[in-house]
Amino acid sequence: MGAAMRRIHVGNALSAFGLGFTVPFLYVYVAQVRGLGSMTAGTVLAVFAVAALVVLPFAGRAIVRRGPLPVLLAALVTAAVGALSLGLASSATTVVLAAAALGAGQAVMQPSLATMIVDCSSADTRSRAFATQFFLQNLGLGVGGLIGGHIVDPDRAGSFTLLFAIEAAMFLVLVVIMATVRMPHTPRIGGDAPRAKGGSWKQLLGNRAMVQLSVLGFVLFFACYGQFESGLSAYGVEAAGISTSALGTAMAANTAMIVVAQFAVLKFVERRKRSRVIASVGLIWAVAWLAAGYAGLGHGSQTMATAAFVSTYALFGLGEAMLSPTVAPLVADLAPSGMAGQYNSAFALVKQLALAIGPAVGGPMGASLHGPYVVTFLLFSLGITVLALRLGRRLTPVQDQPSLVRSRVVAQGGAPAEPVPAGA
């Protein structure tokens, strides 16, 4: 791992730390501490998603034209201004505007950092780099939430101001760190899409494999991440009678599975076709939804229901650990040379759409339509398997299994031959 990649991973960890540091406490801060009510607090949470949807279509083109580093630095400054303003805001208007700035800055960080990882990695190292990114993101979120929870006091508005001020300072420190990164130019996998003539969305939509991956990504984020803190938690409380402490244990089991399994899973994933790895995640998540169904509909003991529900979150974590070194590198390898920023931003936009729609659909279903909720998302999980296998037919051999590059070099004693495009 070179110096540039080390700094990039520091950036990933600190940006995730900032997210975990403040976001879990936003509702309490706006609704209770500032006394603006639940309606304003809900609006603030929605503004984060809306801001991301607004800026991400432009972020990709900016990354392509200016490079990921200048865009990242602008995003960090914007997020710092938003965080500090949020800590000082007292009216509904200023709170919403500050949340928009913070949400926009944080949204643009994701594709910028992902593009920097692409530029600083090769086909051999990209899966491991993205696995490390995911590991550090989860670690940052967990540590941030833990420390933030010990700092804030609902009876003291000043404690929240301190929280947001620390977050703003952290973003500015990150500006200094990332400004020292020297971005190398690395060769890309042979056999990927032809070079783009421009950064238009029309060109991206013409890439059938990328379109299929985006549809698959929407289903992935909708059926898993979009349910964690909305539909699935509501289902657990209402249908399975899960206590708040058990819900916290389930979330901890998810994070623990990721931390424990990430690099063990990586060795398994690196030697297999990406499409089949994603397809297997769909099957694992189908088992997770069956466990959730048993927890809420199986009429077993409360202890068994709790154990099944915790297992659901753990199985989701296993699937996430398998996806982190698979999906993000595949987005990069589908991008024409120089277009990684556009593709990363497009995929981040798909993710935000899924995270915005997922809770809106899953929340009410999980709370009241228990049987249909489990069946619906069980079918979505099986749909992931079908979509992944279909995507595999669109990929070149090297895009689907980058380890072929290494095996061909060993077998031939030189550079790998160009892969034959799918369908040729």
Image (cartoon, helix red, strand yellow):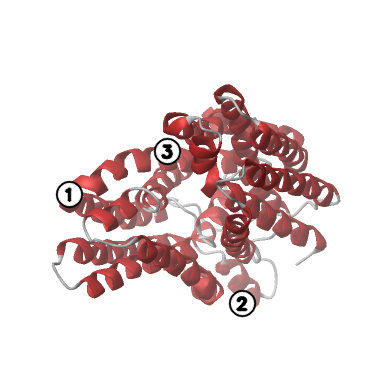
Q: Position of residue 424 (x, y in %)?
A: 45, 51
Q: As shown in the figure, which amino acid type bears the numbered disc 2? A: Ala
Residue 356 numbered mark, or none? 3
Is 140 left or right of 296, judged from the image as shown? right
Do the residues bearing badges 3 and 2 touch, measured as CB atoms within 8 Å? Answer: no
Q: Which residue is mark 2?
A: 411
Quarter in which the N terminus is drawn? bottom right
Label 1, label 2: how far apart the Cα atoms are: 52 Å
Position of residue 371 measured from the top left corner of the image (x, y, whole percent): 16, 53
* Picture residue at 53% right of the left edge, 57% below the top: 399
The structure residue drawn at horizontal position 60% and vertical position 59%, both measured from the top left corner, is: 150
Q: Give the residue at the far left of this rendering.
A: 299
Q: Between residue 81 and residue 288, name the one nearer to us.
A: 81
Please report the residue visible at 67 percent of the width from the left and 55 percent of the height from the top: 12
Q: Amino acid at mark 1?
A: Pro
Front residue of 326/391: it is 326
C-alpha separation, residue under disc 1 versus residue under disc 3: 21 Å
**Numbered disc in front, either 1 or 2:** 1
Q: Secondary structure at mark 3?
A: helix
- In this rendering, is residue 246 above or below 190? below
Q: Which residue is mark 1?
A: 372
Q: Is residue 304 left or right of residue 55?
A: left
- Mark 2 nearby-residue class (10 Å; few <14, some 14–19, many ≥20): few
Element assignment for label 1: helix
Q: Residue furthest front?
A: 155
Q: Tell me the kind of residue under disc 3.
A: Ala
Name the spot of residue 290 as percent of width and height, x first: 23, 64
Would residue 365 appear left or right of 208 to someone viewing this image?
left
The picture places residue 39, in percent across and down from the top left corner, at 42, 29
